[in-house]
């Protein structure tokens, strides 16, 4: 089985990184990814704390179309102490280094374990023109004040890195890893952990995905007017784009909010929690 998918090459490369606290979510996400795709699938996993049973359960999902490969965690800067979650979230900063043993791989889709694939349209992400971008991702609705924390102008879009496609070749050609390390050295603490760093590094120069590829929980919990009022984004998707994403999602990302619990927690009212069974 090949490890790359260029235009016309039938192979999708997907990466998950997690610790032991999200292994159940990984199993569900993985099942949905396999179910909703038809193309050859190369799934790469970095799993802190994986035991033999976890390994066997994951490998059971392999077949003639699906290959699962476990990778070692990258060496990350000692300065990277998360303000939320586990250190495994920082691994996605090092995707080009993670895939250094796979020089034929030029693109990788990173997916958070707390995501559910709802449509075969996920395959369309790999067909994007990425020649001028290191990353393709969906806009995260943040205010001008919040953007200033990352040295971003108010009109600069931020993205949610729970789902993003990385163009490894562009990243390497433009020495993004060197720029990232220099950025890390200037910080003593990290707001929004990896996502904050990536946004400051990319500085709005990302290929914008349709919101259906990363439908965060807030889109289900608020109507469009409420969302704009609460999050106060300077630049954002249209009302129709958000409504269509909620109605016909491709990837649902079960993000944490103050309005509702996540689907695997007691009391959750997320309308798609039934799809996790």
Image (tube, rainbow, N blue to C red):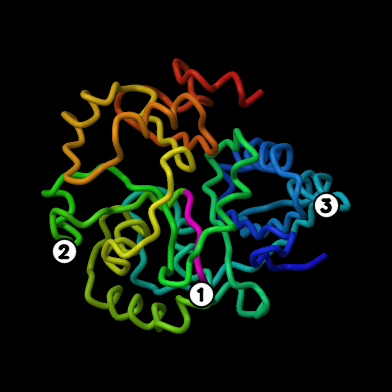
Please state which of the two labelled residues, at mark 1 or mark 3, is closer to the viewer. 3
**Whole-Å distance between the Cαs marked 2 and 3?**
44 Å
Mark closest to the chain's N terminus, 2 or 3: 3
Q: Quadrant of the N terminus?
A: bottom right
| SS label for mark 3 | loop
Residue 85 is left or right of residue 203, and the answer is: right
Query: Where is 270 relative to 179, above or below?
Result: above
**Whole-Å distance between the Cαs marked 2 and 1?**
27 Å
Pointer 2: what residue?
Answer: 151
Q: Residue at x 35, y 49 (%)?
A: 84
Q: Residue at x 52, y 47 (%)?
A: 112
User: As rendered, which of 63 and 205 lies closer to the eye?
Assistant: 205
Asked if labels 3 and 2 touch by Cβ distance under 8 angstroms, the answer is: no
Instruction: Decide whether residue 84 is among the magenta residues.
Output: no
Please state which of the two labelled residues, at mark 2 or mark 3, is closer to the viewer. 3
| Label annotation for residue 24 | none
Query: Where is 50 relative to 27, above or below?
Result: below
Q: Residue at x 70, y 63 (%)?
A: 8
Mark closest to the chain's N terminus, 2 or 1: 1
Outermost residue on the right side: it is 64
| Label annotation for residue 65 | 3
Looking at the rendering, the stretch of residues picked out in magenta corresponds to 163-168
Pointer 1: what residue?
Answer: 75
Residue 274 location, x and y as percent? Answer: 59, 18
| SS label for mark 1 | loop
Residue 167 location, x and y as percent? Answer: 51, 69
Mark 2 closeness class: few <14, some 14–19, many ≥20 residues within 10 Å: few
Mark 3 closeness class: few <14, some 14–19, many ≥20 residues within 10 Å: some
């Amino acid at each position: 089985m090949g490890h790359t998918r260029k235009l016309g090459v039938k192979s999708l490369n997907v990466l998950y990184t997690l610790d032991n606290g999200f292994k159940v979510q990984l199993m569900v996400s993985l099942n949905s990814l396999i179910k909703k795709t038809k193309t050859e699938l190369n799934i790469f996993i970095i799993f802190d704390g994986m035991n033999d049973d976890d390994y066997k359960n994951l490998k059971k999902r392999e077949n003639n179309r699906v290959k699962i490969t476990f990778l070692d965690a990258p060496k990350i800067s000692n300065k990277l102490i998360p303000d939320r979650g586990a250190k495994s979230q920082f691994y996605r900063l090092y995707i080009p280094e993670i895939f250094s043993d796979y020089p034929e791989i030029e693109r990788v889709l990173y997916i958070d374990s707390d995501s559910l694939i709802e449509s075969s349209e996920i395959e369309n992400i790999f067909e994007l023109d990425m020649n001028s971008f290191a990353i393709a991702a969906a806009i995260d609705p943040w205010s001008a004040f919040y953007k200033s924390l990352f040295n971003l102008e108010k009109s600069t879009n931020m993205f949610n890195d729970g789902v993003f496609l990385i163009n490894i070749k562009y990243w390497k050609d433009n020495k993004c890893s060197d720029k990232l390390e220099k950025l890390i050295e200037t910080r003593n603490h990290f707001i929004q952990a990896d996502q904050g760093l990536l946004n400051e590094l990319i500085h709005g120069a990302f290929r914008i995905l349709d919101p259906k590829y990363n439908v965060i929980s807030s889109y289900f919990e608020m109507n469009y007017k409420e969302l704009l009022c609460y999050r106060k984004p300077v630049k954002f998707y249209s009302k129709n784009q958000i409504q269509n994403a909620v109605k016909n999602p491709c990837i649902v990302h079960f993000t944490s909010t103050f309005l509702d619990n996540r689907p695997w927690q007691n009391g959750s009212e997320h309308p798609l929690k039934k799809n996790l069974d």
